Amino acid sequence: MIYSLKGKIVDRNKETIAIDLGSIAYECFVSHPEDYILGEEKSIYTYEVLTQDDHYLVGFSSKLEKTAFISLISVKGVGPKTALGALGKTTPEELFKAIQAENTTFLKKLPGIGPKAAAQIVLDLKGSLVEMNEQGKPVSHDEVRLALKQLGFKTKEIDDVLATITEPGLGTDEVLRKA
């Protein structure tokens, strides 16, 4: 599997970019092709989709975006193209916040996600999301949730307050203090 690519952006259209590594160029589906400037040297994280009918690369500008994509495709009924389309209309931070807050109305507004898929995303991912801070270290709300439960807080109160803490780069200790 290809973890990342670093090279020059040589082509861009409404769904993909091409990144030239010197002797070979790779085409990658991306959520926001407009963020990639032709001629710019860029590093992207990748995910290889290999099915019976398809074989392609998906590119991401950050580890957090890749984590969001992998989380979405782990949900029953959400495929790579749907996950990529959804990420094209939101940010990983907004997506994680909506899932933690059980905001299916927000999720249903994303392309390809209907009421059933939105409910399934919340069911499968709420409470199990592991976010990445700016240093690429995991920040698990599960650890904070457990600590707050041991302090006597109710589950609903904990979930409500954790849904409001979306600042990037916070470690588990900082999230616990804010909560």
Image (tube, rainbow, N blue to C red):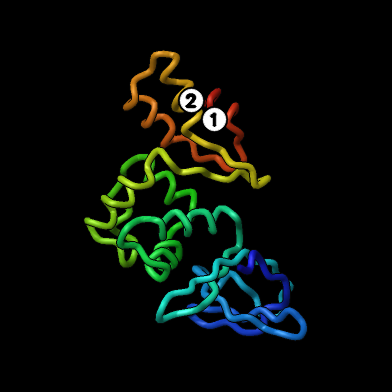
Question: Going 68% across and 45% down the picture, which residue do you hit?
Answer: 135
Q: Amino acid at mark 2?
A: Ala
Q: Position of residue 118 (x, y in %)?
A: 28, 54
Q: Which residue is mark 2?
A: 179
* 150 displayed left or right of 133: left
Proximity of marks 1 and 2: CB atoms separated by less than 8 Å = yes
CA distance for labels 1 and 2:
6 Å
Q: Residue furthest right?
A: 22
Say the numbered circle drawn on residue 175: 1
| Mark 1 element type | helix
Question: Going 56% across and 38% down the picture, which residue do you hit?
Answer: 139
Question: Going 68% across and 70% down the picture, which residue do you hit?
Answer: 5
Q: Residue furthest left?
A: 115
Q: Position of residue 40 (x, y in %)?
A: 71, 75
Say the numbered circle drawn on residue 107: none
Q: Position of residue 102 (x, y in %)?
A: 31, 42
Q: Position of residue 57 (x, y in %)?
A: 55, 74
Question: Going 30% across and 62% down the picture, which residue do you hit?
Answer: 77
Question: How many other residues sit within 10 Å of disc 1, few (<14), some (14-19) or many (≥20)?
Answer: some
In this rendering, the answer to whether 122 lies above or below 77 is above
Quarter of image, res 114: bottom left
Q: Residue furthest top?
A: 152
